[in-house]
Amino acid sequence: MKRVGILTSGGDAPGMNAAVRAVVRTGLIHGLEMFVIYDGYKGLVEGNIKQVDRDFVSDIVSRGGTIIRSARLPEFKDENVRKIGIEQLKKFGIEALVCIGGDGTYQGAMALTKMGINCIALPGTIDNDIASSDFTIGFDTALNTITECVDKLRDTSSSHQRCSVIEVMGRYCGDLALYAGIACGADLIVTSDHILQRNDIIARLKAMHEEGRRHAIVIITEKLCDVHQLAYDIEKGSGYECRAEVLGRIQRGGSPTASDRVLAGRLGVRAIELLLEGKGGRCVGLRGNDLVDYDIEEALKMERDRHSNLIKVVTSIC
């Protein structure tokens, strides 16, 4: 193996640049020729590929987003579309790929490996919804962004004796809501793993209002309900004036935290090591403080098993 490519796919996540930097520099140290593929799998199919050196990744470790950009390409599920991508790799003599992203990125890497291109996948998603890793690149930064926003909203909620219903990202994974709720001292946390019925939410908030609690914070994972309607129902039934706040894509941006930079660096180095060992179809993750790697197909079937302990904390202190 002489030439390795790297791409970022799906939603961008803070720390992706740090991972790109680690992969490129580690590859160069081992005498590999390194290439970046712009715009994810879309750029792969279009042949948007460039050879890079050490200078290309200078001064990017602290930058959010991804300098090699990202895109979604649902058509990549089609084998004929993937064949076009493989032909593009052959034009540049690229024999292996490091793919950074979420589960869709993992599926693409697994499919390419089965077609003869060794791929290593790294978990880059703010949602923390990759079960094979305790934490994903970008999660800690997004969590800190949410915490800062909720702390500011608390000031206004307190001043106006108001309830704030705050919707955070996570797709169908509740980790951002759970961790942020604990970190911010939220009064109620609602996720797909910690469901509270609308009537229960209103009843609890009504009891808080009657106890003289001046304000309340409710953190909820996106896609569970219409938070504006929920805020209306809370105001109607609890006694609190209530507002809904949707944090949205602000959670994706910003300079990555030190934790995300270190995680990205460790995962990036390990990706090159696995390729040098002749391995493909693997994904790298973190268990405790140890790096682990799994077959991608196995990883995609894993169930997330870390919520029970968090929910115990939630039910104890929220």
Image (cartoon, rainbow, N blue to C red):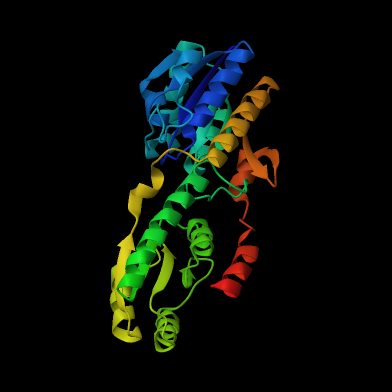
The reply, left or right, for residue 81 in relation to residue 111 is left
Q: Residue at x 48, y 17 (%)?
A: 35
* Left or right position of 133 against 233: right
Q: Determine whether, in the image, residue 285 is placed left or right of residue 109.
A: right
- Asked if one can make out residue 226 in the rendered structure from this viewpoint, the answer is no
The quadrant holding residue 155 is bottom left
Q: How many numbered discs, if any?
A: 0
Residue 229 screen position, x and y as percent: 29, 73
Which quadrant, please, contains the N terminus?
top right
Q: Nearest the camera: 104 or 316?
A: 316
The extreme bottom residue here reads 210
Front residue of 126/73: it is 126
Please provide percent x and percent y for residue 93: 51, 11
6, above or below 232, in the image: above
Look at 44% across and 35% down and name the residue there.
Answer: 9
How far from the left and from the top, in percent, is residue 128? 53, 49
Examine the rendered structure and indicate whether residue 165 appears above or below residue 115.
Answer: below
Q: In which quarter of the view is residue 29 placed?
A: top right
**Is residue 71 in view from this perspective?**
yes
Q: Residue 99: x and y, percent?
A: 52, 31
Viewer-proximal residue among 75 and 145: 145
The residue under the point 39% across, 49% down is 251
Residue 170, relative to residue 227: is it above or below? above
